[in-house]
Amino acid sequence: TAQRKRKLEWHFNALVQVALVAMFSACQPVILTFPLERSVFLREYSSGTYSVLPYYMSKMVVEVPLVFVQSLMTLGLCYVVMSLNGNFWALLWTIVLLSVCSVSVALAISCAVRQPRETGAVGPLVFVPQMLFSGVFIPVSHMPVYLRWMQYFSFLQYAIKILGVVEFKNVPHKELVLDAQDILEDSVPVYVAFLVMMVLIFSITGIQMLRNKATH
């Protein structure tokens, strides 16, 4: 049983690596978007060429197909190399949703800063806690009580839990790894809902911050 649990943990850790690659590869290209285009945006906004919402949504519309292709290539390679067992399309759409959430967070950070170099300071403050509070490296139950509430803002943990349910759906003794990670199979709709909600929250936050900068 101990050997079986160890093999399942290795398999789960491989899945976590796929999620981490998806999260960081999605956020890095867009986190500098607004600081680099700030002067152009302010000039064209002040001249009435376009408003904040169409400008922001155009960035999201461009990024979504890109993250889909990126996720497809990443999972296509990992699915074969890592001998994954879960439904390919379910895993793919989970990674795409994680990537879109990562993009929305990166765009919100981009809207919050003025200079490109500031993203290097703010970015890690947002994305490193995603790993810490995902419960993968350190169980949340072992963290100080006054910090545990932060786990609910970790979109990475919701994506990892969905990936875990999909990947281990038909694997014997799956409860050994699912229980260890506090993953509830019946809560997949809740995990998906949280991811979608975070995309909307961060997008609205980014739009509002960009609007404030454009008018001040």
Image (cartoon, helix red, strand yellow):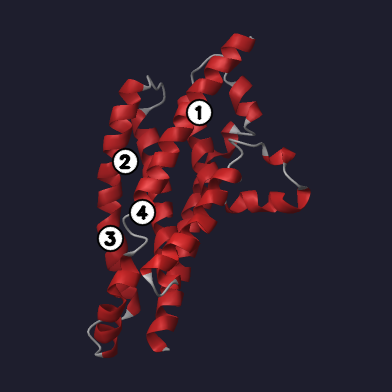
Residue 168 shows in this picture: no
**Amino acid type of the residue tagged 1 in the rendering:** Asn
Q: Which residue is mark 3?
A: 61
**Label 2 packing within 10 angstroms: few (<14), some (14-19), many (20+):** many
Determine which residue is flagged by label 4: 28
Element marked by disc 1: helix
- The residue under label 1 is 13
Number of the label disc, if any, that sits on residue 161? none
Q: Are marks 3 and 2 in contact (CB under 8 Å)?
A: no
- Which of disc 1 and disc 4 is earlier in sequence? 1
Tell me the distance, in whole angstroms, between the alpha carbons under discs 3 and 2: 16 Å
Q: Nearer the viewer, mark 4 or mark 3?
A: 4
- Mark 4 or 3 closer to N-term? 4
Q: Which mark is residue 71?
A: 2
Q: Residue at x 35, y 47 (%)?
A: 25
The image quarter in which residue 80 lies: top left
Query: Callout 2, which amino acid?
Result: Ser
Query: How crowded is the residue under tag 3: few (<14 C-alpha within 10 Å), some, or many (20+)?
Result: few
* Residue closer to the observer: 146 or 176: 146
| Marks 1, 3: nearer the viewer | 1
Left or right relative to 194: residue 15:
left
